[in-house]
Amino acid sequence: HEGRAGFSFAHSEFYLFPTRFHTQAEHVREVITEPLPEWQPGDGASDGLRKRWQAVAAALQRHESRHREHALAAARDLQASLARLGVQPDCHALRREIDRAFLRGKTKAEFRDARYDQRTRNGLEEGIEL
């Protein structure tokens, strides 16, 4: 999940065993929400303003879709990292390795999103401006 508070994964469905790591459904689940602004034009809204809003809303949707792609890539990267963990000596070692994998993925995802927002000036270069 990427938002104002930063990037995060929800991984509350892990089962930890002393010698193995298992996910409940054998994969990392991806749940992404994209709250987008809505506009309810009043009776006095011009056709030009309505068309401009439609263009801005479409540009915003494309921009946020790119962030969604980044989040999905981060989830796939985390899934691959977790699959490579292998057997750990105990739950504490396993938790430490999971935390490391999560932190690496989180850092990479935040950097990817920050670069994208910097390159697009938070979407301004893509038409997100009224």
Image: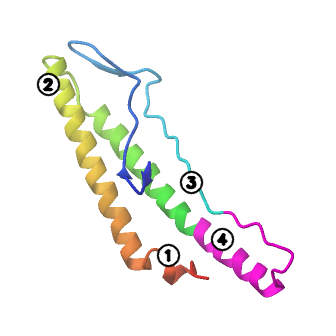
As drawn, which residue projects farthest toward the right?
43
Q: Quadrant of residue 97?
A: top left
Tell me how far mark 1 sits from mark 3, CA to CA.
15 Å
Write down the residue under mark 3: 34
Q: Quadrant of residue 94?
A: top left
- Residue 57 marker: 4
Image point (78%, 79%), residue name = 50
17 relative to 116, above or below: above
- Amino acid type of the residue tagged 3 in the rendering: Glu
Tell me how far mark 1 sits from mark 2, CA to CA.
42 Å
Task: Please rate how many residues cluster around mark 4, counting C-alpha atoms within 10 Å: few if below 14, some from 14 to 19, many from 20.
Answer: many
> Over which residues does the magenta segment extend?
38-61
Based on the picture, tell me whether residue 39 belongs to the magenta stretch. yes
- Amino acid type of the residue tagged 1 in the rendering: Gly
Tell me how far mark 3 sits from mark 4, CA to CA.
13 Å
- Amino acid type of the residue tagged 2 in the rendering: Ala
Image point (31%, 32%), residue name = 83
Task: Please rate how many residues cluster around mark 1, counting C-alpha atoms within 10 Å: few if below 14, some from 14 to 19, many from 20.
Answer: some
Label 2, secondary structure: give it: helix
Residue 56 location (% of width, % of height)? 64, 76
Disc nearer the start of the sequence (3/4): 3
- Amino acid type of the residue tagged 4 in the rendering: Ala
Write down the residue under mark 2: 93
Label 4, secondary structure: give it: helix
Disc nearer the start of the sequence (3/2): 3
Write down the residue under mark 1: 123
Disc nearer the start of the sequence (4/1): 4
Q: Is residue 82 left or right of residue 66?
A: left
